[in-house]
Image: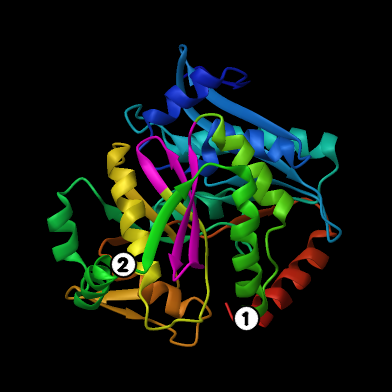
Amino acid sequence: MNLRLQEITNKNVWEDFLLGCNEKTFLASWNWGEFNKLMGNKIWRLGISENNNLLASSLIIKIQAKRGNFLFLPHGPNINSKFKIQNSKLLEILLEKLKEIAKKEKVDFIRIAPIWERNEKNIKVFKDLGLRIAPIHIHPELTWELDITLPEEDLLMQMRKTTRYLIRRAQKNKEIEIWQSKNLKDLEKFNKLYQEVVNRHHFVPFSLDYLKNEFLAFNSDNQISLFFGRYRGEIISSAIIIFWQNMAFYHHGASRLKYPKIPVSYLLQWRIIQEAKKRNCKVYNFWGIAPVSIIHNQLSIINKNHPWAGLTLFKTGFGGYKKEYVKTQDLILSKKYWLNYLIEKLRKTKRGL
């Protein structure tokens, strides 16, 4: 077996490889790398190949923080399953390279948010290579997805009865208006609503610069849109959606509580799903949810006090299925790691996660 690790500098090579990967999110995309460059982060795009066949890829980001610097792999490594190479071997080769980069960049640890299904075999791969579960996750380890290849009426019938009723009620309400925007200036409108959510739930928000850079990175390829829901001329609900490789991702959302009985948010999501279908998307990814259990097709939220409990109830009402990935993993390289560990552990406790 002659496996070779290389840096990939061609956008088409990168994106074409990812088309052949079953498990992926936009966090592996070329444009997510471009977004990180706009944020001032150093990145590497690494690939492992055999006989000119690309087997695996990984976007690596250097994160610089007061509590410690680290290398981060968002939702990776991505592997093309048609090549029968052991995941453990590919990860081992990748980690050797990451240790080299880590030494040059003087970082304290390597963090991986795997895109691998959470099962005993995959968990063991990370454990055997010396990684440990991180104290906090940066990107979702548990997501909710919906197959949107079905006709619209079938999608509606698969929804929770209440969700379907509220969508139909909203469709009849002439005072509700939903529209899509690709105008960077409209991010200010989203951000105003977003800050209201931050004040309600007391979490650390993404900055307006972060949102603008994300918009700029994906907009050149027509891969991002803003959606707004208005009631009586007032914006009540909004979302930032990324469309990438026949998938749509509900990456950011915000809503106002002023009219709790007016189902603007439900119609907004339905219009986004309809737009995703127009773009030939096969999957709608609602992004992160709270832990849930599903027994005999009955879904229940494990911790009703979880800060995402209400949002999870909303997302799962549209029908779909959960996906669980191996928990975020850390490879410790320096004693400084433990300061970061304590800070993140306290932050997680404070947020009630």
Q: Measuring from the top left, give residue 249's x and y in whole percent.
A: 43, 50
Q: Is residue 163 left or right of residue 258?
A: left
Front in this rendered view, residue 260 or 141:
260
Front in this rendered view, residue 152 or 227:
227
The number of numbered badges drawn on the structure is: 2
* Position of 227 relative to 57 (above/below): below
Q: Can residue 26 be seen in this view?
A: yes
Q: Counting other residues with Cα less than 10 Å from the Cα at mark 1, is it few (<14), some (14-19), or many (20 or more)?
A: few
Residue at 52% across / 35% down in the picture?
29
Badge 2 amino acid: Lys
Residue 226 marker: none
| Dot in front, 1 or 2 | 2
Q: Residue 324 appears in which quarter of the rendering? A: bottom left
Residue at 69% across / 50% down in the picture?
210
Q: Measuring from the top left, give residue 257's x and y in whole percent.
A: 51, 80
Q: In this figure, which residue is indicated by the disc labeled 2?
A: 174
Residue 200 marker: 1
Q: Measuring from the top left, give residue 129's x and y in whole percent.
A: 58, 48
Task: Check whether the beta carbons of the residues at disc 1 and disc 2 lie within 8 A of each other.
Answer: no
Q: Is residue 64 left or right of residue 168?
A: right
Q: Residue 261 appears in which quarter of the rendering? A: bottom left
User: Given the current orientation, which residue lies at the most extreme bottom position?
Assistant: 305
